[in-house]
Amino acid sequence: MRLTDSSVVIRPRTSWEAMDLGVLMAREHRVLLMSSWALVSLPVFVLLSALLWQYPSYAIFLFWWLKPAFERLPLYILSKALFGETPSLRQAVRQWPRLLKGQLLASLTWRRLSLSRSFVLPVSQLEGLEGQARQQRLGVLQQRNAGGARWLTIIGVHLEIGLWFGCMALFYLFIPEQVELDWDWQRLALATGPQGLWLEHLSNAFYALILVFWEPIYVACGFSLYLNRRTVLEAWDLELLFRRLRQRLSSVAPLLLLVVGLTLAQLSPTAMADEPADPKPLSTQAASQSIKALLEKPPFKNPQTVTRYRFGEEKPATDPKVQGGDGKLPGWLQHLLDNLNSNTFKHVAQGLEILLWSLLIGGLAWVVWRYREWLRTFVSRRRRPRPNAAKPAPAQLFGLELGVETLPDDIASTAEQLWPTQPRQALGLLYRGLLSRLLHEFNLPLKSADTEGQVLERVHQLQQPQLLAFSHELTRHWQNLAYGHRLPPGAAQQKLCSDWRALFSGGASQ
């Protein structure tokens, strides 16, 4: 991945700005994204509708449930197009079966209803992480932008439903008048038998077509949130800035030095002293008062006091065209309330009531579970543990065993033997050895919830420059391998082992 080849401007953005970028990315490649989605999803929809013709509700439910399998193809296209390697339609569709191999069962079972699905999908598909490594990676990524990803899913659900109903209403409006006279929309909606089946399958087809338009945008917005989070974590914008600055200065540095030298040679103290002073200094207080006076006037401020409720811009009560001027409800509003009070909407109202009560009970349960430690602290009658009680040293950090008995006697030599065949185990051994030494020999108060950065902050408190430099270097290579799957070069491998021997006297684990 070369950041200089990116087709978008890489810089930190807010969550909503990042989603705007996702919409622009989807619009840039809309033909490829929509065509590929249609080619892989519509045949599946037709097959499910044919197999479950008597059960259209089951058919559309299964099609909706398979959305995570279809979402992998737009993500693949966007990840390639981001660095100028946009695949053709044929190449993209051919890659889809290969994209289904990684963690598909998890995506269609316990992860299916995740509100952050579009945001975390690149971790599994692009980074290839799973298990504990995936959880640790998500713990870092979801510290920010996760709320935006959840709102994206919630808004997407409402948008799908709105477009679905809109398509059905538009279809009804396009029916010729002579045909519409023989139809009753409410009767068709409640119809059973063959007449109701074709209407349900038609409604399902509208939903499948809506996904052709919306799902690529949804995946693109989640992908842009993921890119924005990585930009903040890994400082991609600073890396690109330094690269551009180095390229510019490498070509103009000699000329710039020459111009600065000539300017300093010609500049004299007397010339600087002869510069006339400003005869009319600006008064800060007067300028501040003038600015405040301007801001208090239109168009910057238009104060208006309203002491009653109103609907938009009301007309005067004396206008004869205004209905309800005598205190009665307008005719259209009274008609709407009468319809809502009818038996037709009785079941809908009951369903909404059940839904609201369920949300309230679920919200209370979530609050109790979320703040269970706080409640246990202030409500529980059990004795609190003494603050001076010594806490046992953690047996693991970042999923790594830190016990002295789990390490070899000569860590550096063992790591050198593992580099050619098992580089990940070699680097993990050095990092485990460092954490074990910090925990048992230097008595650092490490915790199982500490991050790599917090470990380095505690090493900095030891006031040992060589140990701090080695810890920084080893941690950087460990993070590159754990999160970016980038192995350290050969020279760095040998240097890490040599520095280990220099710091710990041959690498004997005591």
Image (cartoon, rainbow, N blue to C red):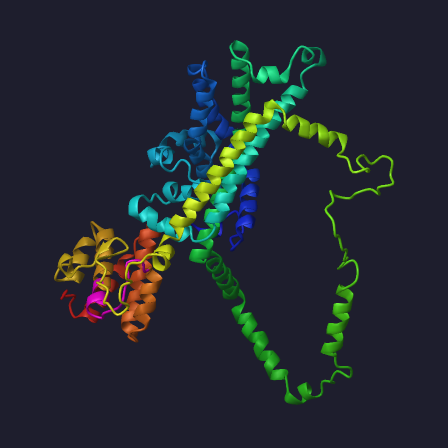
Instruction: Report the magenta stretch's main SS.
Output: loop
Residue shown at the point (57%, 45%) measured from the top left: 20
Q: Is residue 242 visible?
A: yes
Seen in the image, is 30 located left or right of residue 319?
left
Residue 177: where, in percent of width, then height? 71, 14
**Front-lying residue, 341 or 154:** 341
Boundaries of the magenta span: 436-450
Q: Is residue 440 magenta?
A: yes
Q: How many marks?
A: 0
Seen in the image, is 421 located left or right of residue 199?
left
Q: Is residue 154 magenta?
A: no
Residue 251: where, in percent of width, then height? 52, 64
Which picture quadrant has residue 450? bottom left
Residue 3: where, in percent of width, then height? 46, 52
Seen in the image, is 127 located left or right of residue 189?
left
Residue 181: where, in percent of width, then height? 70, 12
Seen in the image, is 445 located left or right of residue 111?
left
Residue shown at the point (53%, 18%) measured from the top left: 200
- Above or below, 327 against 268 in this view is above
**Front-lying residue, 151 or 413:** 151
Residue shown at the point (67%, 30%) measured from the top left: 337
